[in-house]
Image (cartoon, rainbow, N blue to C red):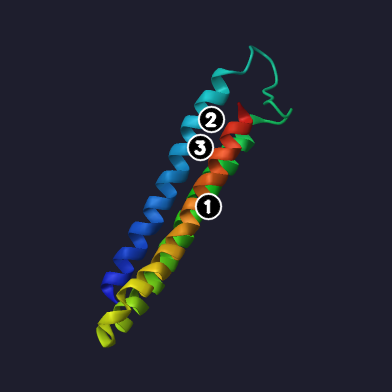
């Protein structure tokens, strides 16, 4: 693994962890604010909102991590292919876009989970 790949991987992991932590912390703060004094916290579906925020954080963080790894692998292959055949640039960008779609799907799931919490 080249030094650039290691740095890109480390940045991807840091970004994924940060996105998940921000969702978890701010969601947890909102969940704690809605708990009545001495009561049990329940969300719209009758479950603990903290678990819902944790699920949203994991959906965002892990999908961002997977997308970063996929873009790193596909991007390296695209650079090699475009170096040999420059006319394939348009087709290769579609492959990178598909790899980035993983993060978008995770974000959509996270938004759906957060909407369900109310």
Classify mark 1: helix, strand or loop.
helix
Q: Residue at x 48, y 38 (%)?
A: 23
Q: Residue at x 47, y 58 (%)?
A: 101
Q: Residue at x 28, y 86 (%)?
A: 85
Answer with the quarter of the image where residue 72 lies. bottom left
Query: Which badge, 2 or 1, comes first in the chain's sequence?
Result: 2
What separation in Å lies between label 1 and label 3 (alpha carbons)? 18 Å
Query: Which badge, 1 or 3, comes first in the chain's sequence?
Result: 3
Per the image, the residue denoted by label 2 is 28
Using a 10 Å C-alpha cutoff, classify the residue at mark 3 as few (fewer than 14 neighbours), some (14 to 19) or many (20 or more). many
Using a 10 Å C-alpha cutoff, classify the residue at mark 2 as few (fewer than 14 neighbours), some (14 to 19) or many (20 or more). some
Using a 10 Å C-alpha cutoff, classify the residue at mark 1 as few (fewer than 14 neighbours), some (14 to 19) or many (20 or more). some
Q: Are marks 2 and 3 in contact (CB under 8 Å)?
A: yes
Per the image, the residue denoted by label 3 is 24
Task: In the rendered view, tell whether residue 24 sits above or below residue 84.
Answer: above
Q: Nearer the viewer, mark 1 or mark 3?
A: 1
The count of marks equals: 3
Q: Position of residue 105 (x, y in %)?
A: 52, 52
Q: Is residue 112 left or right of residue 7?
A: right
Q: Are marks 1 and 3 in contact (CB under 8 Å)?
A: no
Task: In the rendered view, tell whether residue 88 sits above or below residue 99.
Answer: below
Q: Residue at x 67, y 14 (%)?
A: 38
- Report the disc number at residue 105: 1
What separation in Å lies between label 2 and label 1 (alpha carbons)? 23 Å
Classify mark 3: helix, strand or loop.
helix
Residue nearest the observer in this picture, 64 or 81: 81
Q: Position of residue 39 (x, y in %)?
A: 69, 16
Classify mark 2: helix, strand or loop.
helix
Quadrant where the C terminus is found in the figure: top right
Answer with the quarter of the image where residue 75 lies. bottom left
Q: Are marks 2 and 1 in contact (CB under 8 Å)?
A: no
């Amino acid at each position: 693994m080249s030094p650039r790949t290691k740095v890109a991987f480390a940045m991807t992991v840091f970004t994924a962890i940060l996105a998940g932590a921000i969702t978890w912390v701010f969601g947890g703060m909102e969940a704690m604010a809605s708990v009545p004094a001495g009561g049990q916290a329940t969300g719209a579906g009758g479950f603990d909102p903290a678990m819902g925020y944790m699920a949203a954080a994991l959906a965002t963080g892990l999908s961002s991590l997977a997308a970063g790894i996929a873009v790193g692998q596909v991007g390296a292959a695209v650079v090699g292919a475009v170096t040999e055949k420059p006319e394939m640039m348009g087709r290769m960008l579609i492959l990178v876009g598909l790899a980035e779609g993983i993060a978008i799907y995770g974000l959509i799931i996270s938004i759906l989970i957060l909407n369900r919490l109310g």
